[in-house]
Image (tube, grey):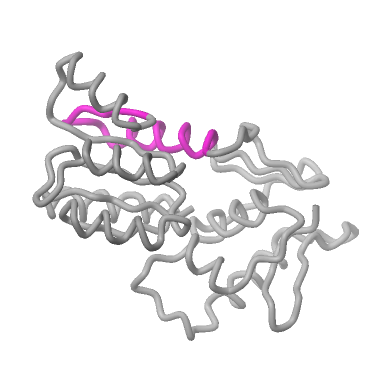
Amino acid sequence: MRILIVEDAKKLGLALKRGLEGEGYAVDTIFDGLSARKRLTARADEYDLVVLDVMLPGLDGMTLCRELRARGLTTPVLMLTAKDAVADRVSGLDSGADDYLVKPFAFAELLARIRTLLRRPRQTLPTELKVDDLVLDPASRTVRRADQPIALTTKEFALLELFMRNAGRVLSRDEILAHAWDEEYDSFSNIIDVYVNRLRKKVDLEGRPSLFNTVRGVGYGIRA
């Protein structure tokens, strides 16, 4: 899952980036409203969620959110603000935000709200993701196959979640990079092949059919 953080306080924005990357998310950061508008207008489909501060230089978060919704952006938006009055919260939600978190906040609460929003973007998704006898729980960050637990690294978990949310599709390398790695990553690296091979070894248990689908020259996926 790929997240865009729009936060003018660079120290906070970079701290959130490090924390979310530690949880397996791919994260990009932008520090002003005008740059965020340009990015989201051109590349909105690359992001699964936007964490948006209200007070931004150039263009405030509420105006930005309202503009993006008017253009048809359906990406979930979690709005951050230091304003805790009821009227401010109402204004934030009325601008098109899906949730509203008041600063200061606990990182654990931010994670919980992000997980909740990622379970209900654009289409209703189940709490657990299931493909055949493979089960992934985004909330508890656990994976089981045939009731056997599978230990994954944070990046392996993020990649498997991406595949399972798109079961039956073969994702191109560009799609995988867009949703599982941030923009700083070298797109010419073989990192995708390395991680898919690691996942295949862990998920395809002996005696069970392979769930991975590889189309040479196209990409990878999980069979529906």
Q: Is residue 46 magenta?
A: no
Q: Residue at x 29, y 30 (%)?
A: 95
Q: Locate residue 210 relative to residue 103 in the image: left or right.
A: right
Q: Residue at x 69, y 69 (%)?
A: 220
Q: Which residue is drawn at 60% across and 37% down?
A: 123
Query: Which residue occupies the extreme front position in the image?
Result: 70
Residue 210: image quadrant is bottom right
Q: How many labels does the image show?
A: 0
Residue 175: image quadrant is bottom right
Q: Locate residue 10 relative to residue 171 in the image: left or right.
A: left
User: Residue 78: percent from the left, percent from the top?
Assistant: 33, 36
Q: Locate residue 23 relative to residue 126 in the image: left or right.
A: left
213 and 97: which one is in front? 97
210 and 47: which one is in front? 47
Decide: is 162 above or below 76. Answer: below
Query: Which residue occupies the extreme top position in the image?
Result: 86
Decide: is 81 above or below 47. Answer: above
User: Residue 90: percent from the left, percent from the top?
Assistant: 26, 19
Q: Residue at x 35, y 50 (%)?
A: 20
99 and 149: which one is in front? 99
User: Residue 194: percent from the left, percent from the top?
Assistant: 59, 76
Decide: is 137 above or below 160. Answer: above
User: Residue 97: percent from the left, percent from the top?
Assistant: 34, 32
Magenta segment range?
Answer: 99-121
Q: Is residue 102 magenta?
A: yes
